[in-house]
Amino acid sequence: MKEDLDKRDDMSYLQTAGRALSILKMFRQENTLSLPAIASGLGVGKTIAYRLVHTLMTEGFLVQDPLTKQYSLGEQVLLLGFCAVQRQDVKRIAHDFLWNFHERTKISTYLTIPCGNQSLCVDRVVSDSTGRLSTVFVGGVYPLFCGATNRVLLAFASPQFQSGYLRSLELPGEEMAQLAEDLKQAQARGYDFTHNRLTEGLFAVGFPIYNSSNQLVAGLSVGGVDDPARPDAVEQFVQQGRQLAVEINNQMGSNYYSNLIY
């Protein structure tokens, strides 16, 4: 409500453009929407909603199923999203590091970036053993509190963001307390670790990636399959993953890891 009031007070804010963008934002939670649902979400009549939707369809940002009359996102949204991801400095810089690391170690790697209150996977290089099991895919959006691949972004976020995010979760008291403790431990040791969180039989170790202003811009994780015959596997993944994180951070111009003592 306060945000809507602020917009009405902004003399430069164009209401029509704002409404069109609000329609696109509705598809964050829904795959398809009807015209009445869009009109209701905007708080306008169906005539206004139709004109907005028609314009978005004409420009390729929405498509309509001819049978169900439901609307969904069009290819222009996909193209814009793809361009935005490809132009992320951290993805461009990290990509070759991920591949070179995988060629040396055969360890699976994932790169995620903050996306609102969620995590977006922008790159991954997986081994045959984990690739068949992994449920994290490029372009996938995941909750921040699930798995080190995503949770590392929450663990090393600003205290204000972290506290606000935790308050927004509807978790039982014990789970919330455990999550808060896990985040605290991750900050203390400089990396996050989860086991059987997103995928049964897999573990992951997550490291923060910073830019030259030492702002958190991504999470790097390395993961593997449980192997009772190798009890030291997790520690080896921690050491190798940390070295990869250091290399990427250095290339990003960050001195974050140089200030840590292991």
Image (spheres, grey):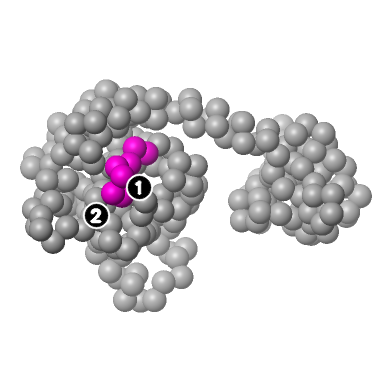
| Residue found at the far bottom of this picture | 173
Q: Is residue 84 left or right of residue 51?
A: left
Q: Could you tell me which residue is drawn at 25 percent across and 34 percent down?
A: 102
| Residue nearer the viewer, 181 or 103 | 103
Q: Is residue 156 left or right of residue 77?
A: left
- Residue occupied by mark 2: 225
| Residue nearer the viewer, 152 or 202 | 202
| Residue found at the far right of this picture | 47
Q: Could you tell me which residue is drawn at 62 percent across and 36 percent down?
A: 78
In the picture, the quarter occupied by the N terminus is bottom right
Give how far across and how far down residue 144 sits, in percent. 40, 54
Give how far across and how far down residue 238 sits, in percent. 16, 46
- Residue occupied by mark 1: 131
Q: Could you tell me which residue is drawn at 17 percent across and 57 percent down?
A: 227
Q: Could you tell me which residue is drawn at 49 percent across and 49 percent down?
A: 141
Residue type of the residue flagged with mark 2? Val
